Amino acid sequence: MVLALPAMIFATGQTATGSQEIRFAWWGNAVRDERTNAVIDLFMARNPGVTVEAQIGTWGGGYWDQLAAQAAARNLPDVIQQDVSYIQSYANNGHLADLESFARSGAINLAQWPESGLGAGRLNNQLVGLLLGTNAWGMGVDRAVLQRAGVTINDEAWTWADYEQIALQVFQRTGVQTFPAVTFTQVFEHVSLQFGIGRFSADQRALGISQNQRAFNAMRDYFEMINRLRVAGALWDPEDAFIQGRAMAEEPLATGRTWNAGFWSNQFAGHSAAAGRTLDFYMYPTVEGNRAPFGTYLRPSMYISMAQSSTNKDLAARFINFFANDIEANRILAAERGVPIPTNVRADLHARVSPNDAIIFDYITRITPFASAGSTYPDAAGEVEANMRGIVLQMVTGRLGVQAGLDQIVRETNAILTR
């Protein structure tokens, strides 16, 4: 709609040629960006006169800072890739549109979506996001390095004590180091779930391990183990490992400097492509005496949401429907964001995905019997993670004692959650 202002000024979402325009924001990597841009091109080819502008970021490279600034200005992209750690806050602050009305009108088709796949996107009695896939945390491992070291892994039985011995054996026999605790938040979660608690307390006002001494002790044992590997020379430089936002091809796993790294299952294709060689994907080890299944959980990989501030919600709904449901589009995306939810899309892709992607389809199927429900996250989860990061870096570099570091993490996290 043209405003009653100077002739060349147009409302957001409409251009001088009369075409329709929306913005789509996501964080990604080289593989995700290439596939997503190809899907955007397909959507525009099918919809002449429509433009989808890409806003691409990286998780640690300012994506969330940029969104926060746009949210404050009520100028969010029309369509937004959201994460479980942030979506509650965006929903609570009224930044996300309810997709239910578009589902009722048929603009977004949910006929192939099981209710279990929709539940995680319902917050405050509104459908504020569609899951783009089922995801699980795990450990990517360089198969060739383990073979050279004479190591085999049974991830349904191994413990953190086994992990330490494997790390030392790999280093002694190959010189390849172990990736440090940069993925500490997932270790907190994995360990906590083994003791029947989440990363956060049930009322979301405290860190989970602060409510369970055995879980606290297990985390202390974990960080002490990491420090033993550092002293032995078997740990990759934590200062380097904590660098965020660099290309996967520059990560130490891809360059052969570490034998492992922790990441989400939907990132496996990107890491494998960056490494250019065969990787395997395993469940994380368990605490001695506990069962591994309690630490493993299925998680929404990410969501696709619509901004409440969008001035072209009908077009945004069409794009969301296309992105989540279209068979051809999802063949291009090839489950890089996680194993898809719609039953017809999942069935089609399972028969078509690459060997690397098939590893993840099979991984999700294999771990499902072991998986717990995972944790729920408070609004301040992202702030907590950012605050913990600097403390953990001091712990794994030996500048701060493990006990003192964990006490500080508990104290500061609980202060953030209760203010």
Image: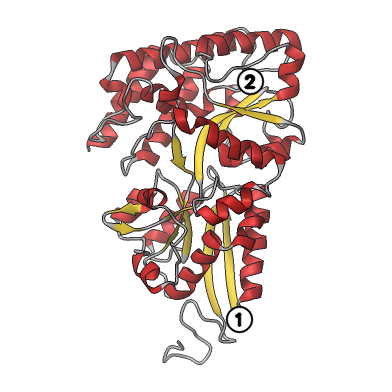
Say few, some or many: other residues with alpha carbon within 10 Å of mark 1 (under 14 / 14 to 19 / 20 or more). Answer: few
Q: Quadrant of residue 69?
A: bottom left
The disc, 2 or 1, on the residue closer to the chain's N-terminal end is: 1
Q: Is residue 259 visible?
A: yes
Q: Is residue 272 above or below residue 128?
A: above
Residue 315, given in percent of the width and then of the height, sits at 49, 74
Residue at image position (43%, 31%) is 371
Q: Which mark is residue 283?
A: none
Residue 318, given in percent of the width and then of the height, sits at 50, 71
Tag 2: amino acid: Trp
Q: Is residue 309 visible?
A: no
Mark nearer the viewer, 2 or 1: 1
The quadrant in which the N terminus is found is bottom left
Tag 1: amino acid: Gly
Q: Quadrant of residue 306?
A: bottom left
Label 2 and label 1: CA atoms lie apart by 51 Å
Going by the image, does 18 lie left or right of 209? right
Residue 37, given in percent of the width and then of the height, sits at 65, 60
Tell me the residue that label 1 is attached to.
Answer: 49
Report helix, strand or loop for mark 2: loop
Residue 92, given in percent of the width and then of the height, sits at 29, 54
Tell me the residue that label 2 is attached to.
Answer: 236
Q: Is residue 161 above or below residue 298?
A: above
The quadrant in which the C terminus is found is top left
- In this view, the residue in front, 328 or 28, is 328
For the residues bearing labels 2 and 1, Cβ distance under 8 angstroms: no
Report helix, strand or loop for mark 1: loop
- In this view, the residue in front, 265 or 274, is 265
Residue at image position (60%, 61%) is 327
